[in-house]
């Protein structure tokens, strides 16, 4: 049903537009750059299992250095084409974009780009004028499906329709009749099984408006069915009239958790509804963070695996070293045994399995010391001395190695956090370069050619008071920002006990107001591992008080005097 209203919006904005450019930022995403006589826009299409959709976007997704083969094919057929219509198949989750194009001979032809928005079965399929599949984002062969094949050259078949009733084609009475024969189900479940194009959210909302709570159909009386009929009539009229109110549902932290084409009241005060301008804006905002995570996961799979293995390896090594350190704490007993044997060797004989000697360290209490019968008392004493010196050296070395291991583990955690928050190819490439400099991986051949490229600048924000706020994107940039770029009077912020970015408030010799400090703290919390937490502690101190320990890894600084601000992370738009 949401797609029904979105199709109307796309029809109004896209029909008549010419395709200027085509990009494929990810394997299951397409962006069509459109131009009309009066405006331009980016039409975004996704067949991602987590976020399939079609809408105009204000974002400019970062594209790979070389376009994939499918992108080149689409440029060949749809480059310069004009969108002639946008159609939905009933209330099903299939949107067809029709194009008027020119073939290689200069003759007019038509193409259809079918956007099938069906969770893990989502797809984007290009179909020619004869109804034949040209290609698709996801090719489906017989090993993947026995129902429907998606391969170039095969005739296109629409997805099989569900056995549900469409309010655009059927009367409300037919829906009520279907609901009545499902007495064992709750009302929302019965509506979900009966209504085409209705989401679980809308079905729960209809049930809430009808009964106040989601009761079984068997408990509904005729008055309740009459109320349900009124609700369904109103919904049908809304669909026919094309009148809707695109709404984002927000949780208590103002994070989008759902969306709808109408106001939602079933959650009471637990969810806040926010009306937005149009469906493209709604979907762009709802899926933005989820898409960033998916893209990062796809583009950095090798780095994620490398960091995971390095973290696990370092943690195992630390466990072994700590266990060995615990064993070395018994070295004083070894020294005492050696001294007692040496002091009494004149009365000890070779061949004894143990020596019972007075321990003058414990009021001459008898101490039984195990001995090697094959060695003389002097040799047994030397063996205990040797074990003592070995344990003492082990403790010194192990203590040093454990400190180094803990620092490495902390560093790997900061790199992992930065990778999870990376927003594009450039940031992932910068992290890859950092890891190669640290010796965790080899630099790729193509990366070697890019060494002289201008590095990414820090993220830049401007507070409500007009202060510039800078955020490091990775550990190398954190060092550059905090230790070289920041002036002595600038204020430095970082989440307490959480890995995250270094944040600098550029003071320009002005006093930093409390409002700017809180904004910067919220930004620091957002750009950290504590992004999804509440009441995050953020330390702040003048940049002049930062100290870089000798030999410390990138991003590591220490400070002794600071203030702490407790904030809830909040996303803001960078410039």
Image: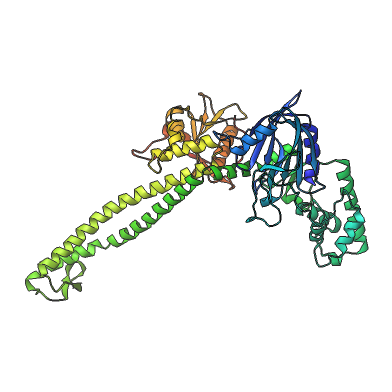
Q: Position of residue 116 (x, y in %)?
A: 72, 46
Residue 131 appears left or right of 495:
right
Q: Is 542 left, or right, of 208 in this rendering?
A: left
Which of the two residues, 19 or 496, is positioned nearer the viewer here? 19
Q: Report the number of discs.
A: 0
- Identify the residue at horizontal 57%, vertical 44% (top origin): 531
In the image, 464 versus 40, the foreground residue is 40
Seen from the viewer's position, the closer of residues 357 and 388 is 388
**Residue 262: x percent and y percent?**
80, 45
In the image: residue 131, left or right of residue 230? left
Residue that protrudes farthest toward the front in the picture: 105
Residue 207 % position (x, y): 82, 57
Q: Can residue 17 be seen here? A: yes
Q: Residue at x 40, y 44 (%)?
A: 440
Query: Looking at the image, which residue sits at the far left?
Result: 346
Please name the residue shown 78% across and 40% down the image.
6
Residue 572 in view here? no
281 relative to 402, above or below = above
Q: Residue at x 14, y 66 (%)?
A: 381
């Amino acid at each position: 049903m949401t797609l029904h209203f979105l199709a109307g919006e796309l029809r109004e904005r896209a029909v008549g537009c010419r395709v200027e450019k085509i990009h494929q930022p990810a394997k299951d995403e397409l962006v069509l750059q459109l131009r009309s006589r009066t405006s331009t826009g980016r039409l975004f299409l996704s067949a991602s299992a987590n976020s399939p959709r079609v809408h105009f976007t204000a974002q400019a997704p970062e594209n790979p250095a070389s376009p994939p083969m499918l992108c080149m094919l689409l440029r060949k057929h749809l480059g310069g084409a004009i969108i002639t219509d946008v159609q939905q198949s009933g209330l099903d989750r299939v949107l067809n974009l029709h194009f008027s194009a020119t073939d290689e001979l200069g003759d007019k032809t038509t193409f259809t780009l079918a956007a099938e928005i069906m969770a893990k079965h989502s797809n984007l399929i290009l179909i020619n004028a004869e109804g034949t599949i040209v290609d698709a984002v996801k090719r489906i062969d017989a090993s993947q499906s026995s129902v429907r094949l998606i391969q170039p050259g095969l005739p296109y078949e629409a997805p099989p329709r569900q056995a549900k009733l469409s309010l655009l084609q059927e009367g409300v009475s037919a829906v009520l009749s279907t609901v009545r024969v499902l007495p064992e189900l709750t009302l929302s479940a019965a509506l979900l099984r009966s209504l085409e194009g209705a989401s679980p959210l809308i079905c729960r909302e209809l049930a809430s408006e009808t009964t106040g709570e989601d009761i079984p159909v068997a408990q509904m009386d005729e008055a309740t069915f009459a109320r349900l009929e009124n609700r369904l009539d109103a919904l049908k009229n809304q669909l026919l009239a094309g009148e809707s109110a695109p709404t984002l549902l927000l949780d208590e932290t103002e994070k989008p958790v759902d969306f709808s084409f109408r106001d939602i009241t079933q959650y009471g005060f637990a969810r806040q509804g926010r009306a937005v301008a149009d469906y493209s804006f709604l979907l762009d905002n709802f899926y933005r963070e989820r898409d960033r995570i998916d893209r990062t996961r796809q583009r950095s799979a090798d780095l994620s695996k490398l960091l995971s293995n390095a973290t696990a390896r370092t943690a195992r090594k630390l466990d072994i070293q700590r266990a060995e350190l615990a064993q070395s704490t018994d070295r004083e007993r070894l020294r005492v045994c050696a001294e007692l044997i040496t002091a009494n060797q004149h009365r000890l004989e070779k061949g004894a399995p143990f020596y019972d000697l007075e321990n003058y360290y414990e009021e001459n209490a008898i101490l039984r010391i195990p001995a090697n019968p094959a060695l003389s008392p002097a040799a047994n004493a030397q063996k205990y001395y040797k074990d003592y010196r070995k344990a003492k050296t082990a403790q010194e070395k192990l203590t040093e190695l454990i400190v180094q291991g803990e620092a490495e583990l902390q560093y790997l955690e900061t790199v992992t956090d930065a990778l999870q928050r990376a927003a594009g190819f450039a940031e992932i490439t910068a992290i890859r370069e950092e890891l190669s400099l640290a010796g965790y991986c080899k630099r790729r051949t193509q990366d070697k050619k890019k060494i002289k490229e201008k590095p990414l600048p820090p993220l830049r924000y401007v507070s409500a008071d007009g202060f510039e706020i800078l955020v490091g994107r990775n550990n190398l940039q954190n060092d550059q920002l905090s230790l070289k770029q920041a002036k002595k009077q600038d204020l430095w912020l970082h989440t307490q006990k959480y890995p995250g970015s270094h944040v600098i408030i550029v003071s320009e010799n002005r006093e930093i107001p409390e409002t700017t400090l809180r904004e910067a703290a919220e930004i620091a919390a957002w750009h950290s591992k504590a992004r999804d937490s509440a009441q995050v502690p953020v330390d702040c101190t003048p940049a002049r008080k930062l100290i870089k320990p000798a030999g410390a890894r990138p991003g590591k600084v220490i400070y002794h005097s600071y203030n702490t601000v407790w904030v809830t992370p909040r996303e803001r738009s960078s410039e």
